Image: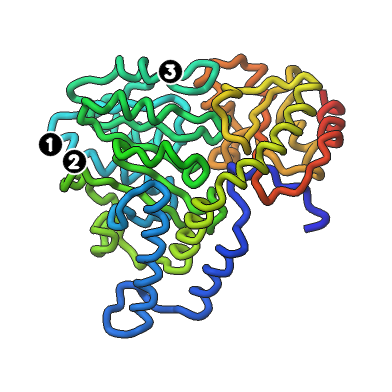
Amino acid sequence: MENRPIYLDCNATTPVEPLVCDKVCHFLGEEMGNAASRTHVWGTKAKQAVQAARQQVAEVVKAKNDEVIFTSGATESNNIALLGLAEHGEASGKKHLITTPIEHKSVLEPLSILQERGFEISYVPVGEKGWVDPAELKKHLRDDTLAVSVMHVNNETGVIQPIGQIAEVLNDHPAYFHVDAAQGFGKEIDPLQNSRIDMISVSGHKIFGPKGIGALIVRRRGFKRIPLQPIMFGGGHERGLRPGTLPVPLISGLGEAARLALISHKEREQKCLVMRKEAMEALIAIGGIINGDNEKVMPHVLNISFPGLDSEAALVALKDLVAISNGSACTSQNYEPSHVLEGMNLSEGRIQSALRISWCHMTPKVDWSEVVSAINNVR
């Protein structure tokens, strides 16, 4: 790794914690059982590992074990949460949903599909600070509102959405509340423990766990389960919502990552705050403008624009020093202006010159003077 740039793209994917790697390797190399096999000890061991991981994920948000459904990641979880409500919405006549224009594409695109099926979608504006006003969201609520979907933390700006206040707005309304928590689960703990949040989407590779595993936490309302229908078919796994053989090594890794997050999030946060202070001091000094509310942002993310800078040219200039991005990794194969920054009504120049820098507690020290020099060379 000595010849590689310092990795500063943790919002795209995080490094894997060593203890998580050990857990995954153990179940890859020594415990090959299928958790659905009832007749021998190998299956029993696998089932026990899955149950333990389910408990570890549930504890982070104070949910019950049987409310955790394992998926391939938050993208699949978001699809199940939204598309899975369609049948109930059509049957009940509730065909209105509320979201924001800065959601991840794995929320916006399923909602577009629902719109094609006759559902109506309201997009609550966020403004330049990058967070949705709960009072504004309340204005969009209707008797036929089926669900509200608002992310926990924005993946491009790191801005924290007021999901606790949105939960209060929904206290007297039956709409289902879905939160895409891919960027906040295991990092900002308290808001996701609010029992008014009906569904929470989680990705393992955003919390120092393996790729290819995640969860949809589906809380019951009293004794009633949310009327989700599966979007894939082929078995009774995961309470009939997500068919397929459970990937025990990945599930165990997600469980371990959740356990470590719960006990270490404060310590991790402090390390990230130190790096954020260093980055801001260096980059604001050369004219950097922070995108998003600096008072409501996660400590490990900095979205910053440099007037007159072409972000693509900056990425090339910085590629041997630091690995950063200018938007979501999910849409960066063919660069288009960030829909998040557009949704915040930022100027074209500010959007075109935006860089996303994201780190973690395992990130080595960065020589910000070298980063500043490289940026200045392409301005």
Give, as a three-letter code, the residue at label 2: Glu
Q: Is 291 placed above or below 3 here?
A: above
- Gap in Å between the C-alphas at discs 1 and 3? 29 Å
How packed mark 1 is, by other alpha carbons closer than 10 Å (few <14, some 14-19, many 20 or more), is few
Image quadrant holding the C terminus, namely top right
Rendered residue at 45%/35% (across/down): 152
Rendered residue at 38%/74% (across/down): 46
Question: Could you say whether the residue bearing mark 3 is in a helix, strand or loop?
Answer: loop
Give, as a three-letter code, the residue at label 3: Pro
75 or 183, which lies in front?
Answer: 183
Residue 82 visible within the image: no
- Gap in Å between the C-alphas at discs 1 and 2? 6 Å
Residue 41 percent across, percent down from the top left: 35, 84
| Of labels 2 and 3, the one closer to you | 3
Residue 307 visible within the image: yes
Colour treatment of the image: rainbow
Give, as a three-letter code, the residue at label 1: Ala
- Gap in Å between the C-alphas at discs 2 and 3? 28 Å
Residue 373 percent across, percent down from the top left: 87, 31
Image quadrant holding the N terminus, namely bottom right
Residue 286 percent across, percent down from the top left: 81, 21
Q: Is 222 placed above or below 125 here?
A: below
- Is residue 244 left or right of 11 when viewed as pictured? left
71 or 115, which lies in front?
Answer: 71
Rendered residue at 35%/26% (across/down): 166
Judging by the rendered image, the residue that carries numbered circle 1 is 91
Q: Earlier in the sequence, mark 1 or mark 3?
A: 1
Judging by the rendered image, the residue that carries numbered circle 2 is 87
Judging by the rendered image, the residue that carries numbered circle 3 is 125
- Is residue 218 left or right of 253 when viewed as pictured? left
